[in-house]
Image (tube, coloured by chain):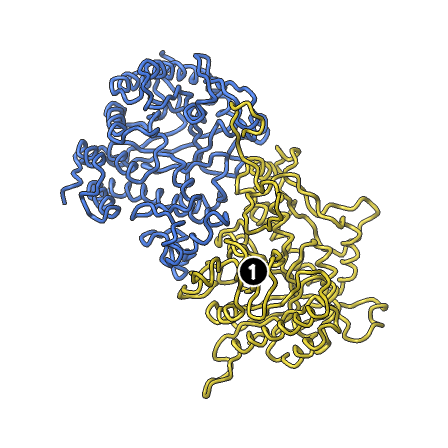
Chain colours: A blue, B yellow
Amino acid sequence: MLKMAQQKAALSFELVAKCSVSRARASTMILPHGPVELPMFMPVATQASLKGLTPEQLESIGCRLCLNNTYHLGLKPGQATLDAVGGAHRLQSWDHNILTDSGGFQMVSLLKLAKITEEGVRFLSPHDGSPMLLTPEHSMSLQNSIGSDIMMQLDDVIATTSPDKERIVEAMHRSVRWLDRCIEAHKYPEKQNLFCIIQGGLDLDLRRECVKEMVKRDTPGIAIGGLSGGEEKAKYCAVVRTCTEMLPDMKPRYVMGVGYPEDLIVSVALGADMFDCVWPTRTARFGNAVTSRGTLNLRHASYAADFSPVDEDCDCLCCRSKEDGGLGVTKAYIHHLTGKETAGAHLLTMHNLYYLLDLMRNARKAIIGGTYPSFVKDFFGKIYNYDKDEYPVWAIDALNTVGINLTEP
Amino acid sequence: MNTFRVLKTAVTDVAATTTQPGAATARTGVLNLSKGFTMQTPNFLAPTSRGVVPHLSPDNLEKNTGVEGVFVALEDFIEKAPQRIPPLYTYPSTLRSFISLPSSTFLLLSPRRSPGITCPKANSDANLSILTSVGFRDLPIKDYVSAVVRLEPDIVLGIADIANTVSPGKNRVQKMVNRTEMWLDELLKMVYPVAAAGEKEGDKSIPAVFAPILPLEKDRQRFYLSHLVDNVEKLAGLVFTGAEFVDVVPEELAGLPKLQSDVMGGPHQVLEMVGRGVDLFNIGFVGVMTDAGIALHFNFTANEVGDEDKLELATDMWDAKFATDLSPLEEGCECYTCKKHHKAYIRHCLEAKEMTAWVLLQLHNLKVMERFFGDVRRSIEEGWWEKGRSAFEKKYKREMPEGTGLGPRLRGYQYKSVGGDKKLNEPAYRSLDSGDEDGL
């Protein structure tokens, strides 16, 4: 235990400002491939490529930390190739930071194929059906080969909506044991940061117990996992709030799998710093634009002749007019391309990511400027046209617990 | 004004100079378009699909390629017209603005893609048969002609009435010739309206009209050709499909730039056509190579090589031997892909079916073409064209390599179903626990 209490960290964390009302924080984290400003949204480049964008394009929208999936990179190009190439940064020519998951999430998403034992997870490769075993040691070894700046422990993930209480308890305890095995197996703690993942389903006492155990291990950062799997938003918020309450101030907090703009804004108020989700990029490929007025399905015929920019309030490359040095892409043009030419997906992917990155940049500015509560009110007001009856109840309730009253002017 | 000036004609060997004067040879020229675009020829246009150079968002096209002109088909934009008015027709600005085309790139408008999918229905006097993303439709000639004014292309192609059969009979040929002439006249009437009183010529920028040359022997279209000669003042260029028909161009039209709109055969075909005096090329084969995961790497130089085996023109990047190869697609290449990425990444992205693979290949392949045409122009200007051409023939294999991997997802509007076809796209995943190999 003593050894664990002196975890090495390959990052430094500076708390820049705290909201005087809510628990929102602005911070700066210096990682091996440069500093990143929190709160932030991290785009997901699943297979070491961000869905048709070049690293140059990803960089140009301000991304300095993106995700790769260990599970996918373990299958393609495979560990031997990663070792030969010299890691994922060199593979994709990305000079900024990379965070990798542990492969554990695929237990939920591919549960039909997976069998979990104390040793690890047995599953069939979806590519060729061959049996594979993912242990904490193997996950660490893969992530060491990838060379990610932040690596995640292998955790025992089960859907929070699972009715099997005993299984949830077991998964929480197993995740703690697996963290110990991950710490033991991690080869480069001086250049890669290992984050723990808090589990415990929707049971707040279980979450508290897990936080205590995980915090003892003193990892450089802490993730709240197992959420965003279809649970009620109110319960999601309760879990995040319960965890952040107990977490040390001076470590980054990462809520996994969250990407809806409203969820980000509320979670930041609850004290979370980092988020990732495939939703903005996936939904872009289906022709959905994430905007300050909500999500627009640009495939709908009503946009066929809508010649306004994708988001009038956005100043990303796509939305800016030609006169302002942008591309002047209209809703009609995205409608024309969606599902037919991939360049349409690339444009909308860039816009959606820019929107989320910029949302977090503005949140950070508001926190530093001491105006986060009114920033939150403006954000909801815009989406719901200031019609307070339309505001989601879960958001009103969650924000109330941290002193932001959405329904007040 | 749209002008074309021949700068230099290639020095040819003795045998060639004994043929009749005016026989076409390689030449360099400069094409000036009325909106200020200038293009050195021989040069290429990049084919587009639905207004984009496939795989390239407009920012990538502008920043990372040297594409100077694009070939855009109206059939990509008009879906259910005339039952439903296409958004493009109500768009308050130009086609270039609709597709966010970089301001340094000029736009050529064609009624159809080139090569277009053959339509089951024949053309009529008033309609051209086309394929939109919702199926085979009619494009009324008057719609195309009036679209030209609104859409403000820099170059507009006249419409050719081309028979679906390889060897049309006498009556069909008659129709081809008559309709093509009639349709060209309609277009010219629209582009050059009878000058209203007080209106000075040159007030407005006028699209450059390229008249089609029909895929027929010279004497079968001689009346049409002489009609072109009569209207030479109004023509800015000629466009043709199929290699053999470039030679039917009468001497009076020799000063016009010639565009071959369906170059599918690769660089050897381009060189052959340059040698016959063709100036502009719509390079369809490049997109085919990109989609197949193939990287081009050929150079046009005066250096002869020995008797070694001929070199490949391109390489299939699906090959597993590139899995850990950290060298660029082509040593010394100045494209974004080669400066920033390596073979291992391209191969990984292809294998993982990540769209970035085709983005990076397209950027590289277009750069190869840019360099190739630059060298061809230089060879003509510096007097080593013939030498370069024979060196190229000796140095490189004639055929492009066959693709082995799967391309990006195919779209229905790119193909004509002939019945009983296999699925265009393999399923990406299948169920493992069904026990059924096909996952059905």
**Coordinates of residue B92 in the picture (x, y in percent):** 40, 66
Q: Amino acid at mark 1?
A: Ile
Instruction: For residue A190, say whether it is visible.
Output: no
> What secondary structure is marked by label 1?
strand
In this view, which residue lies farthest toward the left?
A: A408
Asked whether residue B312 appears in the rendered view, the answer is yes
A27 sits to left or right of B301: left
Say how many tags the image has: 1
- Percent coordinates x, y for residue B331 in the rendering: 65, 45
Quadrant of the drawing holding the N terminus of chain B: bottom right
Q: Nearer the viewer, residue B354 or B38?
A: B354
Quadrant of residue B235 within the rendered picture: bottom right
Determine crowd level at label 1: few under 14, some 14-19, many 20+ residues with C-alpha closer than 10 A: many
Quadrant of the snapshot with the C terminus of chain B: top right
Residue shown at the point (46%, 69%) measured from the top left? B150
Label 1: chain letter: B
Left or right: A9, with A339 as reference point: left
In the image, residue A47 sits, relative to residue B45, either above or below, namely above
Q: Splitting the image into 4 quarters, where does residue B72 fall?
A: bottom right
Q: Residue furthest bottom?
A: B197
Q: Residue A371 placed where, x, y %?
A: 21, 43
- Compared across the picture, whether A273 is left or right of B13 comes to left
Image position, residue B28 (x, y; %): 68, 68
Position above or below: A350 against B184:
above
Residue highlighted by disc 1:
B130
